[in-house]
Image (cartoon, rainbow, N blue to C red):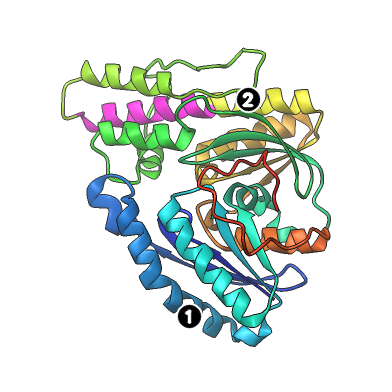
């Protein structure tokens, strides 16, 4: 089996995948409560708690799976992108474990983990060439996926990512951290047409994203409203803001699918668990006659199951393991080599 460790930001995660691609165990220790008073992730606190939680989490993961260190055939860890201090904890721990057991080590790109996460249920069955949308707090990416390790980034955000826009506007509204789920909850009771927000970059020939203008528009409109917001006004504002982001993402997916010619679309990342986005994508892709793979909610945010699965897929594809001398890369792009 393959043991994987994920510590790219503020979640400490460990997972086990069998050599047949079956997910045996996935355990996550969340730090949301720790960072909530600061309205965002504090790198020093994150890395300190990774160091404290990781050994116990590995032990707990093994116990729950009924496994032992002697059962491993490979070790994997997220080596980028992410917070350098957080990445270093998991990467170093995994390398030390691999060296102690003389096992192959896989340095996994966090975004590759997200990219492959919608296909966890396929296990070892072939993953079709497809268009991938990764949408999270730090990333908004459209990727042409021809095969494992063969990724062509078609478009990315020029400023804020979609999840970042959700969190920042939620903070302006005084909603708790993390803000994206808070906005989604209030939006369920709101009118998405109550406020007018721009659909930035939609209708352009490129496949780029931009959410800073949308965020600025939200700030200006909030400044004109009586504070604190009445319940109905808050719900309407959340619904309209959410709808703007969903419109942008859906429009870009449709455009990228036509451009790439893919008849399969896969969507992953933390924002992929947004119910409105999922509803709209299901409807859009059905009408277009394309197959849609949506990541399951529990694997949409940071987790080690997707890291273990990425390592499994590399082994299955015959891609060599990584060098122990490879350093972490906090800005590692999917466009760069995976080894």
Is 230 colored magenta in this rendering?
Answer: yes
Provide the secondary structure element on which disc 2 rests.
helix
The outermost residue toward the left is 227
Q: Badge 2, how many Cα within 10 Å: few under 14, some, many 20+?
A: many
33 on left or right of 111? left
Residue depicted at 79% across the width and 32% down the height: 289
* Residue 211 visible here: yes
Which of the 4 image quadrants contains residue 95? bottom right
State which region is magenta.
229-246
Residue depicted at 80% across the width and 35% down the height: 263
For label 2, the residue is 252
* Residue 26 visible here: no
For label 1, the residue is 60
The outermost residue toward the top is 204
Up-down: is 122 above or below 103?
Answer: above
Which SS type dominates the magenta stretch? Answer: helix
Residue 229: percent from the left, percent from the top?
21, 28
147 on left or right of 266? right
Provide the secondary structure element on which disc 1 rests.
helix
Residue depicted at 24% across the width and 33% down the height: 231
Up-down: is 190 above or below 268?
Answer: above
Residue 337: percent from the left, percent from the top?
70, 45
Residue depicted at 47% across the width and 39% down the height: 138
Residue 301: percent from the left, percent from the top?
50, 52
Up-down: is 130 above or below 59?
Answer: above
Is 5 colored magenta in this rendering?
Answer: no
Quick one: quadrant of the N terminus? bottom right
Comparing 184 with 146, the one in front is: 146
Comparing 291 with 212, the one in front is: 212
Residue 175: percent from the left, percent from the top?
27, 40
């Amino acid at each position: 089996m393959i043991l994987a460790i994920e510590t790219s930001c503020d979640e400490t995660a460990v997972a086990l995948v069998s050599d047949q691609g079956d997910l045996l165990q996935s355990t996550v220790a969340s730090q949301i409560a720790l960072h909530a008073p600061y309205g965002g992730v504090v790198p020093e606190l994150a890395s300190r708690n990774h160091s404290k939680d990781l050994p116990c989490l590995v032990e707990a993961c093994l116990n729950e799976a009924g496994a032992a260190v002697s059962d491993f055939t490979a070790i994997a860890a997220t080596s980028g992108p992410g917070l350098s201090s957080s990445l270093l904890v998991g990467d170093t721990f995994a390398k030390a474990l691999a060296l102690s057991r003389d096992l192959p080590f896989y340095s996994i790109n966090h975004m590759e983990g997200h990219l492959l996460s919608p296909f966890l249920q396929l296990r070892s069955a072939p993953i079709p060439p497809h268009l991938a949308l990764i949408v999270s707090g730090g990333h908004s990416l459209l990727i042409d996926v021809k095969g494992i390790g063969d990724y062509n980034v078609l478009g990315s955000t020029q400023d804020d990512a979609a999840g970042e826009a959700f969190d920042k506007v939620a903070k302006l509204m005084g909603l708790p951290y993390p803000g994206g789920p808070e906005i989604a909850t209030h939006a369920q009771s709101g009118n998405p047409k109550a406020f007018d927000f721009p659909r930035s970059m939609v209708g352009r020939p490129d496949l780029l994203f931009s959410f800073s203008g949308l965020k600025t528009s939200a700030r200006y409109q909030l400044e004109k409203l009586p504070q604190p917001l009445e319940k109905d006004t808050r719900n309407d504002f959340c619904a309209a803001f959410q709808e703007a982001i969903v419109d942008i993402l859906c429009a870009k997916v449709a455009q990228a699918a036509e451009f790439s010619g893919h008849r399969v679309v896969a969507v992953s990342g933390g924002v992929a668990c947004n119910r409105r986005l999922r509803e709209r994508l299901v409807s859009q892709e059905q009408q277009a006659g394309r197959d849609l793979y949506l990541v399951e909610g529990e694997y949409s945010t940071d987790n080690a199951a997707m890291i273990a699965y990425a390592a499994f897929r590399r082994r299955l594809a015959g891609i060599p393991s990584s060098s122990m001398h490879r350093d972490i890369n906090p800005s590692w792009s999917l466009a760069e080599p995976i080894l």
